[in-house]
Image (tube, rainbow, N blue to C red):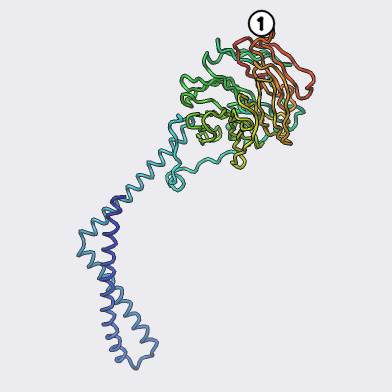
Amino acid sequence: MCLLAVFCPVLSLHCQRLIRKVMSNKKRRNRKIISDSSQVSDQTVNQPSEEAGIKNSEIQTEHDDSLGKTGLFSYLKSNLLMVGIIAFVTLGVVASGLKYLDESAQQEINRRANPRRNLNERSEQSFLNKVNPFLPTPTPTPLPLSKEYVYAGSRLLAVEDKNASAAPPSDLAIWRPSSGEWWVMAGTGTQQVNQQWGSSGDVPVPGDYDGDGKTDFAVFRPSDNNWYLIYSSTGGTAQFAYGASGDKAVPADYDGDGKTDIAVFRNSNTTWYISQSSTSSTVSGAFGVSGDIPAPADFDGDGKADPGVFRESSTPNNSKFYSLNSTNLQTQETTFGVQYDKPVCADYDGDGKADIALWRSSDATWYIKQSTDASTQSIQFGIGTDTPVYNDYDGDGKVDIAVWRGTASSSPGGDVGKWYIRNSSNPSSTRIETWGAAGDKPVPAFWKRQ
Ligand SMILES: [Ca+2]
Ligand SMILES: [Ca+2]
Ligand SMILES: [Ca+2]
Ligand SMILES: [Ca+2]
């Protein structure tokens, strides 16, 4: 660029000189030709006027060309050194530009080829990528499989099938941090599943990462910011470095391709980092403020999970829930809940849109703002020390209120490990199951392997 800044005024100056010189030559010669032509006309007075006109015109054109070429040639000849410098600099500038485009294209190709980059390698989308001739045309983003897979946050709730009368129900399952074992309870016609995956200190992040409709065993390890997965489709394992110290794992299907996307929420800069399964590239954006509790779900019902945060406040009527709808990228603000509430957003009324919902341990009550009519339901269910384990257990497409008891309510050990499920298809009858022990983490999902 510096070369261009010096080079352009010099070139402009010489061009102006050249044009002025050629023009002055032309004017001088034209005057001479007009004088010569009048002499010719006098000599050809007996010839037809048209023929004489043609001859004069040809003569004039011939003189013009020869004069222009002569002027340019003589100028170039007298300024040979400067012309050489200009040509050399021009070639240098063009070569540098091509080399820059080539290197830029190679960097972009490498970026696209590396599907799971470290978050610190934030990609800058260069304008040149749109016009760079050395860059291959990007593969178009696949269209989302709308409504085929239904998620609430990282949980696969159901797989909708047009030909099926009911969606498959969620399985009861726990992850045991002390041994890293996953225990999936046997359901109707299915075997119990036991899988060792992960270790103490890990965070279970089950999801359907390979998009086969079955949940995959997965953990996020905060000590090294790695994700460890077992794909249900192949049984193969995978490891991805994604995230930084202090990040919160928020996996969900943000791009709507039916596969869970690895994602983290960074409280320090309130930014969401999403490794999209459809493009193998990271999208990131700030949403929320420090201290917000992330709670992604598909609030607008387009099959793509939307970032969402609960902002608790000690001031009455000042706690709010914010979601960033994927359909129009508009932020939706809802005044809801009180301090210490825990977000449990999912589709409780079964309209395909996640409902803003909170679990309040102080009165063991579920507060659900139904997306169908914006009314708020409050349902007391469980005890304050329970863990909410909402999911679709009866397979009717509506998420069921449910709790897992990790701490004894009265008689020590008497009810630890019990699941209490309020099926939406039969809310008056509570389903009670025993699965798990103190210290376990409940991970209900669609785990069936048969
Ligand atoms: Ca899977
Ligand atoms: Ca996805
Ligand atoms: Ca959405
Ligand atoms: Ca709903």
Direction from residue 442 to residue 198 in the image, left or right: left
Q: Position of residue 163 (x, y in %)?
A: 75, 31
Q: Provide the secondary structure element on which disc 1 rests.
A: loop
Q: Position of residue 300 (x, y in %)?
A: 65, 37
Amino acid carrying mark 1 in the image = Pro
Outermost bottom residue: 46
Q: Position of residue 301 (x, y in %)?
A: 67, 36
Comparing 249 with 45, the one in front is 249
Give me the residue at 36% from left, 47% from top: 98
Ligand 3 - quadrant of the structure image: top right
Quarter of the image for residue 347 reads top right
**Residue that mark 1 sits on:** 412
Comparing 363 with 315, the one in front is 315
Instruction: Check the image and report above or below for 357 versus 42.
Output: above
Give me the residue at 54% from left, 34% from top: 288
Comparing 7 with 94, the one in front is 7
Instruction: Check the image and report above or below for 57 versus 304.
Output: below
Instruction: Check the image and report above or below for 139 versus 57.
Output: above
Q: Residues within 10 Å of mark 1 (few under 14, many from 20)?
A: few
Quarter of the image for residue 405 reads top right
Direction from residue 24 to residue 155 in the image, left or right: right
Quarter of the image for residue 352 reads top right
Q: Position of residue 398 (x, y in %)?
A: 73, 28
Q: Number of callouts in the render?
A: 1
Give me the residue at 66% from left, 23% from top: 360
Q: In which quadrant will I find the C terminus? A: top right
Instruction: Check the image and report above or below for 394 versus 286.
Output: above
